[in-house]
């Protein structure tokens, strides 16, 4: 679906980092005839996108993951951009609608993503995640209304609700980024951050409106926050004992 939703683009560059699920064969056989496949070892989330963007011919690049699609609204909005609309713009960010077991995850929206970029006008953070791309001096970031669709067609997969390996990976990456910025996990962080996260997503962002599904999503999000701050605390403690 990702490739189909990009058929209107002038070129499609697929960067594969060792997949074994037939992605390369599927991409090469895509009916659009526009797909160029490159195999590149994994560099990390943000550096991998930077590499992929550098391989594109055009100055403007729209970046997607394999499980994402461009909605009809977003496609129309991008195609409708005039020269005056992109003048002085480095990045167009857009909301992303996330789905689990084909259900829309209300509380994770708007989940803005900086995915439409002008290659010569952006600065790339070298950290892997969270993915940070910023406008160079003299350029701006603007917002689109159309959405990316993430994981829209995947039926129930248990790991969508509980994937220890992926949550561990994300917790370590995010904690490393926080540590690099000088952030530390204080006592109050460890006590309050998970509870505040649950309140934010379940109550303030309306996850309670989705019944048991919403409750599970709020739990999942809270666990992610708990793990992130726990790993950050672990970075600080290091080899010390008794703390």
Image (cartoon, helix red, strand yellow):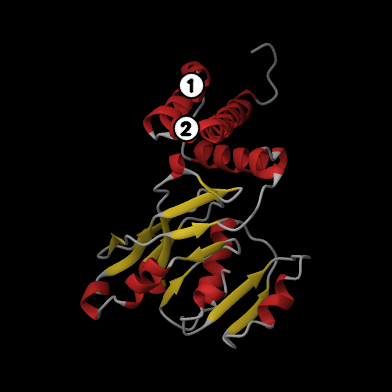
Which of 72 and 53 lies nearest the eye of the viewer?
72
Q: Secondary structure at mark 1?
A: helix
Q: CA distance from mark 1 to mark 2?
A: 19 Å
Q: Are marks 1 and 2 in contact (CB under 8 Å)?
A: no
Residue 62 quadrant: bottom left
Residue furthest to the left = 84
Query: Where does label 1 land, which residue?
Result: 195
Measured as percent of width and height from the top left, residue 222 is found at: 54, 29
Query: Where does label 2 land, which residue?
Result: 183
The correct choice, above or below, for 28 with respect to 20 in the image is below
Which of 197 and 206 lies nearest the eye of the viewer?
206
The correct choice, above or below, for 6 with respect to 110 in the image is below
Residue at image coords 65%, 44%: 160
Mark on residue 55?
none
Measured as percent of width and height from the top left, residue 199 is found at: 43, 25
Residue 26 placement, left or right of 48: right
Residue furthest to the top = 242
Q: Counting residues from the N terminus, which is met first, the one under dot 1 or under dot 2?
A: 2
Residue at image coords 34%, 77%: 79
Which of 187 and 222 lies nearest the eye of the viewer?
222
Residue at image coords 32%, 60%: 145
Q: Secondary structure at mark 2?
A: loop
């Amino acid at each position: 679906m990702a490739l189909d939703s990009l058929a209107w683009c002038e070129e499609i560059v697929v960067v594969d980092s060792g997949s074994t699920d037939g992605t390369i064969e599927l991409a090469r056989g895509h009916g659009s005839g526009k797909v160029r496949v490159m195999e590149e070892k994994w560099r990390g989330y943000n550096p991998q996108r930077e590499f992929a963007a550098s391989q594109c011919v055009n100055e403007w690049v729209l970046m997607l993951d394999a499980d994402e699609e461009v909605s009809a609204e977003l496609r129309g909005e991008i195609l409708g951009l005039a020269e005056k609309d992109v003048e002085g713009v480095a990045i167009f960010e857009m909301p992303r609608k996330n789905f689990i077991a084909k259900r829309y995850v209300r509380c994770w929206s708007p989940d803005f993503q900086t995915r439409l970029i002008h290659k010569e006008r952006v600065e790339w953070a070298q950290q892997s995640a969270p993915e940070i791309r910023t406008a160079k001096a003299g350029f701006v970031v603007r917002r689109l209304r159309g959405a990316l669709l993430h994981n829209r067609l995947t039926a129930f997969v248990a790991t969508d609700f509980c994937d220890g390996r992926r949550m561990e990976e994300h917790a370590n990456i995010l904690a490393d980024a926080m540590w690099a910025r000088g952030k530390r996990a204080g006592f109050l962080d460890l006590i309050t951050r998970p509870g505040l996260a649950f309140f934010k997503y379940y109550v303030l962002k309306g996850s309670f409106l989705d019944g048991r599904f919403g409750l599970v999503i709020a739990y999942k999000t809270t666990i992610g926050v708990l793990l992130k701050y726990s790993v950050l605390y672990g970075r600080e403690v290091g080899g010390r004992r008794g703390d």
